[in-house]
């Protein structure tokens, strides 16, 4: 038991009971000094008269401290146990949530998500009464046909998805409906397509990603009609000529325009312009000999000196003619021959002859 002593507002100690008795006998501690036994302040003489009382109080204080310590320790233990349980519960809950997420997103979602989530921007191959048909519903609401490595978007044919139906609206107002058997269609699933007058049964052969297939406007593919006609113009003008002969064959070129093939109509506006030809006569495989007058969706059709024909980007076209230093001029119609000659003389002499 440790006892503190107070005299004139100053504290001394703590002392044991034996030390306190000794200091009182020596006179260092006075009987009227105050002693703190752990619970209250009493005079030293009062404390020494009843030392058992002080000891009992000290024991009570020790018991209280022990109980408090054990209680605190128990609380700490309980807290650790509770935290451990919460941690285990959190882990178990996280695993349950993760499992539920995977089931919903990778297994159940396709069955409950709208049809357009499962077919838009994907190439769908149909078997329609023994004939295959490929198409794609683009994300901007347009119908897309698949032609070789091209995805051809027709801006005038749109579609709408409702439930398991896809309604396609043609330019003339006709509506064709694709009725799928499921909102999560897959290969082998049947469907019905058609309109109010006629319907056919079809089967999904495959649904695949568009991968690196390039999406182009329908008007660009209309340029393909120029491939054949421009090729014919090439052989009409040059095919029977000696290409080593001095070029250009201006007279032959102009006369060849009587075929009418040297005039090309714009697929949208209907405006007509003459085909362009290589005025300087470069005949290698990288030199453009003929070109369509129209740039559609950044492309035009060209024929090269080795008779190869392509749909090329306008940037490539301009780069090639600049690299080769060629001059592309319009093939004028017959009634413009004299005018062309006159313009040539004006340009060379500064005045008309």
Image (spheres, helix red, strand yellow):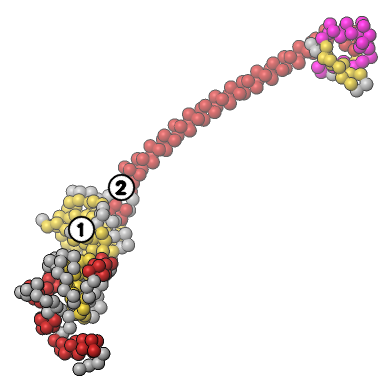
Q: Residue at x 23, y 89 (%)?
A: 349
User: Which quadrant would residue 214 be assigned to in this image?
Assistant: bottom left
Q: Is residue 173 visible?
A: no
Q: Residue at x 22, y 75 (%)?
A: 327
27 in magenta: yes
Q: Residues within 10 Å of mark 2 (few under 14, many from 20)?
A: some
Indicate the position of residue 71 as horizontal and vertical percent values: 65, 20
Indicate the position of residue 312 as horizontal and vertical percent values: 22, 66
299 in magenta: no
For the residue pair 3 and 113, the one nearer the viewer reads as: 3
Name above or below for residue 113 compared with residue 169. Answer: above
User: Which quadrant would residue 316 be assigned to in this image?
Assistant: bottom left
* Mark before the other along the chain sequence, 2 or 1: 2
Q: Residue at x 23, y 55 (%)?
A: 123
Distance Cα–Cα, label 2 vs label 1: 31 Å
Q: Is residue 26 left or right of residue 272?
A: right
Name above or below for residue 173 compared with residue 99. Answer: below
Label 1, on which residue? 149
Label 2, on which residue? 111
Q: Is residue 2 visible?
A: yes
Q: Is residue 185 left or right of residue 54?
A: left
The region drawn magenta spans 16-39
Q: Residue at x 15, y 65 (%)?
A: 285
Q: Secondary structure at mark 2?
A: helix
Q: Where, quadrant-wise, is the C terminus in this rendering?
A: bottom left
Which residue extends farthest bottom? 353
Indicate the position of residue 331 as horizontal and vertical percent values: 17, 80
Q: Where, quadrant-wise, is the N terminus in this rendering?
A: top right
Q: Residues within 10 Å of mark 1 (few under 14, many from 20)?
A: few
């Amino acid at each position: 038991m440790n006892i503190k002593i107070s005299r004139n507002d100053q504290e001394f100690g703590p002392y044991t009971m034996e030390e306190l008795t000794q200091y009182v006998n020596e006179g260092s501690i006075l009987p009227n000094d105050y002693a703190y036994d752990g619970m209250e302040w009493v005079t030293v003489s009062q404390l020494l008269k009843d030392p058992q009382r002080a000891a009992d109080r000290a024991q009570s204080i020790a018991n209280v401290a022990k109980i408090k310590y054990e209680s605190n320790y128990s609380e700490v233990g309980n807290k650790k146990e509770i935290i451990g349980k919460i941690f285990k519960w959190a882990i178990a809950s996280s695993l349950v949530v993760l499992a539920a997420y995977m089931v919903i997103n990778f297994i159940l979602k396709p069955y409950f998500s709208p049809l357009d989530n499962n077919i838009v921007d994907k190439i769908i191959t149909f078997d329609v009464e023994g004939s295959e048909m490929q198409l794609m519903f683009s994300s901007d609401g347009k119908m897309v046909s698949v032609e070789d490595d091209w995805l051809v978007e027709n801006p005038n044919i749109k579609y709408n998805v409702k439930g398991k139906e896809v309604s396609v609206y043609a330019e003339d107002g006709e509506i064709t409906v694709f009725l799928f058997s499921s909102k999560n269609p897959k290969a082998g699933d049947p469907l019905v397509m058609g309109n109010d007058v006629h319907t056919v049964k079809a089967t999904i052969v495959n649904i695949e990603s568009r991968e690196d297939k390039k999406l182009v406007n329908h008007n660009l593919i209309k340029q393909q009609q120029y491939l054949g006609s421009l090729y014919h113009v090439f052989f009409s003008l040059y095919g029977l000529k000696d290409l080593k002969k001095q070029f250009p064959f201006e007279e032959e070129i102009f006369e060849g325009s009587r075929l009418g093939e040297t005039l090309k109509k714009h697929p949208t506006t209907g405006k007509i312009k003459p085909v362009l030809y290589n005025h300087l006569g470069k005949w290698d495989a990288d030199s453009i000999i003929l070109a369509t007058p129209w740039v559609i969706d950044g492309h035009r059709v060209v024929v090269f000196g080795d008779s190869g024909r392509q749909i090329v980007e306008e940037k490539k076209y301009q780069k090639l003619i600049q690299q080769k230093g060629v001059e592309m001029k319009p093939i004028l119609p017959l009634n413009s021959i004299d005018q062309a000659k006159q313009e040539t003389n004006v340009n060379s002499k500064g005045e008309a002859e």
